[in-house]
Every structure is written in C-alpha cells, then in structure tokens.
Amino acid sequence: MKKIKFLILLLALPSCNQYLGTVEPDYTPTNEVTEIFSDLQNDDYISEVEFGDIIFPKSVDPSLAIKDFEIEKVISINKNSTVNFLKEKIIVSKNKTIYLIDMNAQNKFEYELNLNKDEETISIFEFNEDIYILTNRSRLFTIDGQNIFELADYDIFLNTAPIVLEKNLILLSVFGDIYDIELDDFSISKKDNFILKPGISIKSNIFEDNKNLYALFNSGTLLTFDKNNFDYYSNYILEDLNILTSLDRFSELIDTPFSYNENLYFLDRSGKISVYNPISSEILWELNLNETIISYLFSNDGYLILMTSNQILIISNKGKIINSYLHNKKSPIAIFNIQENIYLILEEGISKYNLKDKREDSFYKNKFTINLEIYFQGQNIYLKDNKSIFLIK
C-alpha cells in the first residue's frame, strides 16, 4: 500500500510546480499532518464558549441587536433573482424587471430589461455610486434616473457571478476563460483560462488573505488571483490537498476556503474539514464528521461553528469539538448569530438556541425555502430564499 501511495504521489507531482510565494525547484508536497482528530470521543468539552465575533462567511456587526425579532416580507421574487443592498436601497431582479426599493422612503421603482430568451441577471453592483446590472450573456446595463441603459455586450456566456473589485470586473466564462473589464471605460481583455473540474454550481463567497483572492467556479474548481494585479495563478491547491489528505477527496466544497492564521479552511459537504497551509503544504488538522455539513460560521477567535442535519458543533482552532447540541430539527437550512446567540433557519421558521443550557429559547414561525442567503446591513438582517426577501427587525 505504501508503494502504491508513493507512485500516486510521483505521478501527481507535476501539478505542484506553481505555488504562491517562493518555492524551491525541487519542491515536493509532503504529507505532514500536525494533528488529526477523527474520533469524536477524544474531544475536550467546554460548557460555555465565548466564540467571539463572526467574520466568515460574512462579517457580523458585534453591536447588532434585534429586540422584537419580527419577520417582515419585503418583496416576492423567484429562484433566479439576484439582489444587492446598497446603503438603504434594495436592488433586486425578477425575470426581466429590476426593482429598486428605498427602505427609508418606502418607494419602489421598476425598470424593464430587454433580455433575450434564457438571459437573466447574475450580478448587481455599484461603481462610482452608479448601479450596474450584468446578465449571464455578459450584457452590462446601468440605471440612470428613471431609465435603464445598455452599456456593453461582451458576448460571453456566464453561469457564475463575476468577481467585483474596486475598479475591475472579473468574468469567468462557462468555457474556462478569464476576462477583465475596466469599469472606468468598460474595455475588456482576456487575461487567462483555467481548467474546469467536476463540481456543482453553487453561490459562494470571494475570500482573501494578505496576497491572494480565492473564488470557487463550482464546488470542485478553486481559483486563486493576485490581490494587487488580479493575475490568475495556475496553482493546484485543492489538487495537492487531495493528495496529502488522510481523508477522502474534497470534491463538494460548501464555500470558498477562507484564510485564518495563514491557513485555508476547507469544508466539504460530506462532513470533511481540513486546515491546510498552501505555501508549506502542511495540514494543520483534519476532521471527518461523517455527516452532512449544511451551514457554518467562523469567529475571529478561531472557532468554527457548524450545523449538520442533526446537530450544532463548536470546533476549536486545534480541531477539537468543544461543544455540541442535538437540534433534532427537520429540514435545517442555515445558521446565523446575533451576538452570542445562535439561530437556526428551518423551512417552518427560525429557532433561537441557548447553547449553554442546551435548549431552544424561542421559535419564530415563517415559511422558508431552500437556497437561502443571509445579508447583514447595519442593524438589519435580510433573508432571501427562492420566493421572497424578508427583513428581520
């Protein structure tokens, strides 16, 4: 068996010759695992955990406080709707219509897009205080007062949202081509291309560390860009992790790996977790929960909070499960936090959990669908599912 693993490693070495940072010519990834925790019986239990402020997948204002916790429906949408929150405005697409909702003035404006068959909005973003709309056929529109205008048609097929930067827009085509749009003059240039790996199309976040941007094209294709000039790195971070891991392959990531203390956190829907340093090729720790990971939170103190189909787990930055709670809820969709409280979003409503006493404090009834997204805007929380946008206040 050792000989077989050695031969596989030798065959895979050509994929490891392009790394970020300084790499020696004779660089070879080594299977150095500092700690591996796969037996839940060995975990150190802590009854009260102050896990700090949540920074991933989205940063949460530590001062956020919801007093009455009322759930209010803002607008009906569909499963292909795209939304963005700009100051006190909500801009959302529904079929060929763009709605702009001013939450302060309680005004709603409608704009009609002249879209082709099977064309839909995939991104709404702001540049120089103007609102832009990009479609999956790479047509770019802007809102100007009471009107909406087409600015450019780049004739590129897209199935994932672009990477929106300060002055640039990075497009990832369905064929693996990478394009850069200069938003100052809307000029476009082809930068590179990437190899598409098998995976599921998912809505994921763009994360960064000191030097790089990380994005998922699909659940099995990880892309890395230089943070300063946005050049694409043809590295093999995910491929090398799959060579070195003691677990099965990571092929269905639930989100882009995020960086903490120079390590990337990989979360696979199957329950596998790996904390991996892409420069040293060292795995800090690994864990296999052997159950489906549905949603996660991560704090600035290094605590990973996971919701599976059966339980809530709090994992330390050393890979130990230090607290757990069996929620026994049907159809859990996502979790979020307000200060030290954890909330579970279910198809039937939202449960507020007291992890210290291991009980449900409150339940707020409401109907939700799957593919739910959570947005934090100041002291407001918005939820978007396949049918509606809701405001928690």
Image: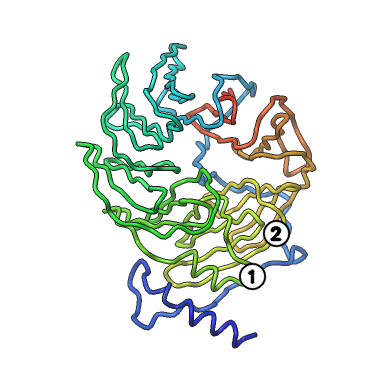
Residue 50 percent across, percent down from the top left: 63, 47
Residue displayed at 55% across by 58% down: 266
372 displayed left or right of 23: right
**Pointer 2 residue:** 289
Farthest residue to the left: give it: 185
Q: Give whichever of discs 1 and 2 has the lower sequence position.
A: 1
Residue displayed at 52% across by 32% down: 80
Q: Residues within 10 Å of mark 2 (few under 14, many from 20)?
A: some
Q: Residues within 10 Å of mark 1 (few under 14, many from 20)?
A: some
Dot 2 amino acid type: Leu
65 displayed left or right of 120: right
Of residues 164 and 324, the one drawn nearer to the viewer in this rendering:
164
- Dots 1 and 2: beta carbons under 8 Å? no
Q: How far separated are the C-alphas under marks 1 and 2?
A: 12 Å
The answer to whether 197 is drawn above or below residue 299 in the figure is: below
Task: Label 2: state its secondary structure.
Answer: loop
Residue displayed at 40% across by 29% down: 116
The answer to whether 267 is drawn above or below residue 69 in the figure is: below
Residue 99 percent across, percent down from the top left: 44, 19
State which quarter of the image contains the N terminus.
bottom right
Of residues 121 and 236, the one drawn nearer to the viewer in this rendering:
121
Task: Label 1: state its secondary structure.
Answer: strand
Of residues 233 and 194, the one drawn nearer to the viewer in this rendering:
194
98 displayed left or right of 7: left
Farthest residue to the bottom: give it: 3
**Pointer 1 residue:** 36
